[in-house]
Amino acid sequence: DTAVSQTPKYLVTQMGNDKSIKCEQNLGHDTMYWYKQDSKKFLKIMFSYNNKELIINETVPNRFSPKSPDKAHLNLHINSLELGDSAVYFCASRPSGGQGDTQYFGPGTRLTVL
Amino acid sequence: KNEVEQSPQNLTAQEGEFITINCSYSVGISALHWLQQHPGGGIVSLFMLSSGKKKHGRLIATINIQEKHSSLHITASHPRDSAVYICALSRGSNYKLTFGKGTLLTVNP
């Protein structure tokens, strides 16, 4: 069974479009994250939600809007896509309540903006 | 200066060699993570350390909190160990991760 899943795996779209990436975890974790990995393979945190509440928002353009309908899902919506948004986006989740802070990563979504 | 620095950036080894990847940091942390990213792109958490040493199979991770330094060792390296190894710092009550730039390891048969 997949622990952290993302859809789609690949996304190719035109500049200016709006797109969403979905993330689901079946681990029962309370905290979820979105990370961006750029063309130089450098990972950087974008957002984190704990029990549907936004707890980290790292100077990301407001074209990016995370949405957490429940604690098992954290979706990423991107408006007015730009060339510089091309990257691999990783979702991750983490248990809380003293269970340690090892994070479990999804397989990534490769976004290409043309 | 980056808060977390890894060395080397690239490392090529022959199968069977002992590998060491280093991570130095300049801030207070709650834990340090070692992650592995396979050529296919998936990221796996290898270790989370707040002190001392951990071992899993052929992998050993150590941390010296006073010196703000961690090492990842691979004994008897194998071509399947070829991957990018990433050091990440966990900080604050939200356990925000700050990542190093990664070390690309290639193990030749």
Image (tube, coloured by chain):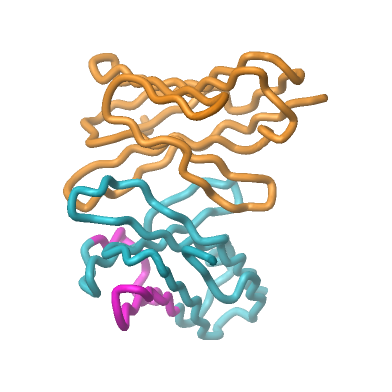
From this view, report whether residue A87 is shown above or below residue B82.
Answer: below
> In this structure image, what is the colour of chain A?
cyan
Residue A23 % position (x, y):
45, 72
Q: Residue at x 58, y 22 (%)?
A: B74
> In screen coordinates, is B17 left or right of A20?
right
Picture quadrant of residue A10: bottom right
Q: Nearer the viewer, residue B60 or B5?
A: B60
From this view, report whether residue B33 is shown above or below residue B26.
Answer: below
Residue B43 % position (x, y):
54, 49
> In screen coordinates, is B83 left or right of A92?
right
Majority secondary structure of magenta residues: strand
> In screen coordinates, is B27 left or right of A105?
left
Residue B40 % position (x, y):
68, 52
> In this structure image, what is the colour of chain B?
orange
Residue A95 % position (x, y):
29, 56
The question of residue A74 being in magenta is answered with: yes
From this view, report whether residue A102 is shown above or below residue B57.
Answer: below
Q: Tell me where the magenta segment starts and ends, as one range.
A: A56-77
Count of marks, rendered view:
0
> In screen coordinates, is A33 left or right of A55?
right
Picture quadrant of residue A46: bottom left
User: Which of the image's four quarters has the N terminus of chain B?
Assistant: top left
User: Which of the image's four quarters has the C terminus of chain B?
Assistant: top right
Q: Residue at x 71, y 27 (%)?
A: B78
Q: Residue at x 57, y 47 (%)?
A: A41
Q: Residue at x 36, y 77 (%)?
A: A65
